[in-house]
Image: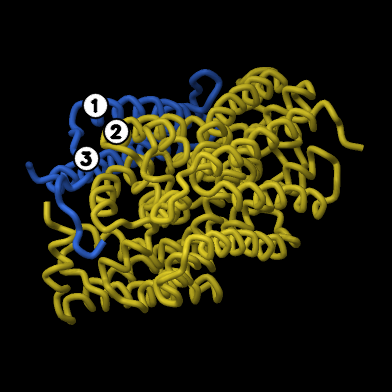
C-alpha cells in the first residue's frame, strides 16, 4: 500500500507542473510565422537564470539523480571524483558555442542544430543523417530517463516497476506535448530550484543518520578500503577509464544538440554571462551532493542489489514522510525536464528538419501543430516500450546515447562555427565515420586504444581526422556561406 | 561595430582555459593525494584529503574563478545584426 503522506506532495507537484504547461501553451504567440520558433525555442527570450536552470536540468537528469548515485553506491568516492569532471562543462559549452551560435542563429533563423547544419553545409544528406541520429540516440537517452523516473516511483509507491513506468510516462508525455519548449524551460527553472533545495535536505538528513561524516567514512573504509580511494573497489576506475569520461561527459558535451539549442534561446549577452555563472554553481553543487549521497549510502544501507534504488530507498528511511515526498519531487522534476526537452528535440527532428524541409515545405500552421504533437506522443510510446525491461544500472544507457550524439555532431558543429574551410563532404564524412566507428566499437567491444578506454575517444579522433582530411581534399564552401557565417 | 566574432573567439579561449585549469587542479589533487595506501590518508572535515581538495575545494574555487573571469573579461555585444536582413530568411 503506498504511503499517502509521501504521495500527496509529489502529486501536488506534478499537478503544478501540468498547470504551467497549460498556461505556457495559452500565453504563447499564436501567429503562424512564429509557431516553430516559439514551440521549439521559446522565441529566444530567456534570461540568465532560466538559461542556467534549463541547461543544468537538462544536462544532469536521471544520470545524476538515479544513475550516478547508483554507480557511486557501488564504486564509492572514486565515482564522485569521476562525476566532478562535469563541473566545467557549462563554462566550456556556453563560452565556446554561446555567442557565435546566438548571432548566427538569429541571422539564419535557426531553431534546431539541424537548421544550423542545413544552412552551413547546404546538404540534404547531412540534414537527414543528422535528424536520424537525433531520433535514434535520443530514444536511447529518453529510455534512460524513463527508467530513472520509474525507479523513483517504484520505491516511493511500492508498486511494480511497470505500473510506475506507466504513471511516469503518461505525465511527462502529456505535458510536453501540450506545452512545447516554453513550458519546458519554465518548468525547468522551477524544477531547478526544487532540486537545489531537495539535495541539501537529503544530505543533512543522511549524514545525521549515519552518525556524522567521520564515522560514515570510517565505515566505508571498513567495508572496502577501495571505496574511499579515487580508484574504487578492486581498482575498477582506472586512469584510462576516468580520462575517457573526461572526453565523454566533459569536453565532447559541446557536441550535444541539446546544448546547441540552448545557446540559441537566450535573450542577450548579459543573460549568457549570468547563465554561465549560475549554471556552474548549481551544476557543481548538485553533482557533488547527489553523488556523494549515493557513495555514503553504502555505509547506511549496505547490500542493495539494484544500485539505482539507493537514493529513493535512503530518502524514505531517513526523512519524515512529507519531507521525503518533497525531496523525491526534485529528482522527478529533473528527470521530467530532461525528457521533455529530448522529446521536443526529437519531434523537431522529424517535423522541422525532415517534413518541413523536404516533404511539404508549404505546410500550414495547423498541420504542423498537429504533426508536432502527434510525433511527440508517438515517440513517448516507443520509448516507453523500450524501457519495459531495464538493466540494473541505467547509467550505461545514458552514456551510450551521449557518445552517439557526440560522434555525429561534435565536429560538424564546432568546426562548422570556427573553421571556414570546413565543407559539406567533410561534415558528412565525419558523421558517417563517427557514428559507424562508435556503433561498431560499442557493439563488438573492440579495444582500440586500450581495454578501459570508452568507445567515444577513438571515435572522436577518427571523425576529426575524417572531417579535416575530406574537407581539404574537396572544394571550399561557397563564398556566400562563408560570408553568412563569418561576416562580423 | 567591432568584430563580434573576434570577441566570441576570445571568450571561447577563456572557456577552454578554465576547462583545462580545472582539469589540472582536479586531477592533480585527486591522484596526487589519493594514490597512496588508504591506511595513510589524512582527513579534512572527516573526508579524505584528496577528495576534499579535489572535489569540494575544487568546486568552490572553480565557481569563484568562473564568476571573476565572466564578470571582468566577457564583453556585452548585440546579438542581432542591426539593420541587416538575411536575403534568404
Which percent across, then down, holds residue A262?
39, 47
Residue B18 visible in rendering: yes
The quarter holding residue B58 reads top left
Q: Which chain is yellow?
A: A
Q: CA distance from mark 2 to mark 3?
A: 13 Å
Residue at (21%, 75%) from the top-left corner? A471
Residue A404 visible in rendering: no
Q: Chain of mark 1?
A: B
Residues indicated by labels 2 and 1 sit on the same polypeptide chain: no
Which percent across, then down, holds residue A449?
40, 67
Horizontally, residue A451 falls left or right of residue A462, namely: right
Q: Are marks 1 and 3 in contact (CB under 8 Å)?
A: no
Residue at label 3?
B14
Is label 1 in a helix, a strand or a loop? Answer: helix
Horizontally, residue B16 falls left or right of residue A324, namely: left
Q: Chain of mark 3?
A: B
Front tag of 2 and 3: 2
The quarter holding residue A331 reads top right
Neighbour tally class for label 1: few under 14, some 14-19, many 20 plus, Cα within 10 Å: some
Residue at label 2?
A273
Q: Are marks 2 and 1 in contact (CB under 8 Å)?
A: yes
The quarter holding residue A423 reads bottom left
Q: Nearer the viewer, residue A395 or A147?
A: A147
Residue at label 1?
B71
Residue at (77%, 42%) from the top-left corner? A303
Amino acid at each position: 500500500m503506498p504511503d499517502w503522506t509521501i504521495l500527496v506532495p509529489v502529486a501536488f507537484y506534478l499537478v503544478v507542473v501540468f498547470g504551467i504547461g497549460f498556461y505556457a501553451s495559452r500565453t504563447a504567440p499564436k501567429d503562424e510565422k512564429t509557431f516553430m520558433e516559439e514551440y521549439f525555442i521559446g522565441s529566444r527570450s530567456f534570461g540568465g537564470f532560466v538559461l542556467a536552470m534549463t541547461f543544468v536540468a537538462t544536462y544532469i537528469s536521471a544520470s545524476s539523480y538515479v544513475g550516478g548515485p547508483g554507480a557511486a553506491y557501488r564504486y564509492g568516492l572514486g565515482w564522485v571524483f569521476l562525476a566532478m569532471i562535469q563541473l566545467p562543462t557549462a563554462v566550456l559549452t556556453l563560452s565556446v558555442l554561446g555567442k557565435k551560435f546566438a548571432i548566427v542563429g538569429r541571422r539564419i533563423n535557426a531553431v534546431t542544430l539541424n537548421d544550423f547544419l542545413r544552412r552551413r553545409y547546404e546538404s540534404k544528406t547531412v540534414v537527414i543523417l543528422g535528424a536520424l541520429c537525433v531520433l535514434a540516440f535520443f530514444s536511447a537517452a529518453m529510455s534512460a530517463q524513463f527508467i530513472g523516473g520509474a525507479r523513483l516511483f517504484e520505491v516511493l509507491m511500492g508498486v511494480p516497476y511497470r505500473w510506475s513506468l506507466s504513471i511516469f510516462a503518461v505525465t511527462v508525455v502529456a505535458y510536453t506535448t501540450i506545452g512545447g519548449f516554453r513550458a519546458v524551460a519554465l518548468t525547468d527553472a522551477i524544477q531547478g530550484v526544487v532540486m537545489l533545495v531537495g539535495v541539501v535536505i537529503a544530505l543533512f538528513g543522511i549524514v545525521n543518520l549515519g552518525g556524522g561524516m567521520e564515522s560514515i567514512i570510517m565505515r566505508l573504509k571498513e567495508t572496502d578500503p577501495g571505496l574511499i580511494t579515487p580508484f574504487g573497489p578492486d581498482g575498477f576506475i582506472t586512469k584510462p577509464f576516468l580520462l575517457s569520461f573526461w572526453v565523454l561527459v566533459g569536453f565532447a558535451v559541446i557536441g550535444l544538440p541539446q546544448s546547441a539549442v540552448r545557446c540559441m534561446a537566450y535573450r542577450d549577452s548579459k543573460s549568457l554571462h549570468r547563465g554561465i555563472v549560475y549554471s556552474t554553481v548549481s551544476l557543481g553543487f548538485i553533482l557533488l551532493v547527489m553523488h556523494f549521497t549515493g557513495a555514503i549510502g553504502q555505509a547506511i544501507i549496505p547490500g542493495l542489489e539494484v544500485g539505482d534504488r539507493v537514493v529513493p530507498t535512503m530518502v524514505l528511511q531517513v526523512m519524515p514522510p512529507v519531507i521525503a515526498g518533497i525531496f523525491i519531487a526534485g529528482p522527478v522534476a529533473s528527470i521530467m525536464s530532461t525528457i521533455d526537452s529530448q522529446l521536443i528535440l526529437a519531434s523537431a527532428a522529424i517535423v522541422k528538419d525532415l517534413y518541413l524541409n523536404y516533404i511539404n515545405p508549404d505546410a500550414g500552421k495547423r498541420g504542423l501543430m498537429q504533426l508536432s504533437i502527434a510525433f511527440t506522443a508517438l515517440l513517448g510510446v516507443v520509448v516507453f516500450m523500450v524501457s519495459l525491461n531495464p538493466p540494473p544500472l541505467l547509467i550505461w544507457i545514458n552514456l551510450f546515447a551521449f557518445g552517439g550524439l557526440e560522434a555525429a555532431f561534435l565536429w560538424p558543429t564546432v568546426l562548422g562555427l570556427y573553421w571556414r574551410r570546413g565543407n559539406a563532404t567533410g561534415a558528412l564524412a565525419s558523421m558517417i565515420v563517427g557514428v559507424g566507428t562508435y556503433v561498431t566499437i560499442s557493439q563488438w567491444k573492440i579495444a582500440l586504444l586500450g581495454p578501459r578506454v570508452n568507445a567515444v575517444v577513438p571515435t572522436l579522433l577518427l571523425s576529426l581526422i575524417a572531417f579535416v582530411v575530406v574537407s581539404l581534399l574537396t572544394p571550399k564552401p561557397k563564398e556566400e556561406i562563408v560570408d553568412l557565417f563569418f561576416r562580423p | 561595430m567591432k568584430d563580434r566574432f573576434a570577441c566570441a573567439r576570445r571568450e571561447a579561449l577563456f572557456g577552454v582555459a578554465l576547462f583545462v585549469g580545472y582539469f589540472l587542479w582536479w586531477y592533480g589533487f585527486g591522484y596526487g593525494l589519493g594514490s597512496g595506501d588508504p591506511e595513510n590518508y589524512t582527513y579534512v572535515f572527516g573526508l579524505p584529503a584528496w577528495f576534499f581538495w579535489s572535489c569540494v575545494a575544487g568546486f568552490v574555487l572553480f565557481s569563484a574563478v568562473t564568476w571573476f573571469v565572466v564578470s571582468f573579461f566577457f564583453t556585452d555585444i548585440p546579438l542581432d545584426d542591426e539593420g541587416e536582413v538575411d536575403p534568404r530568411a
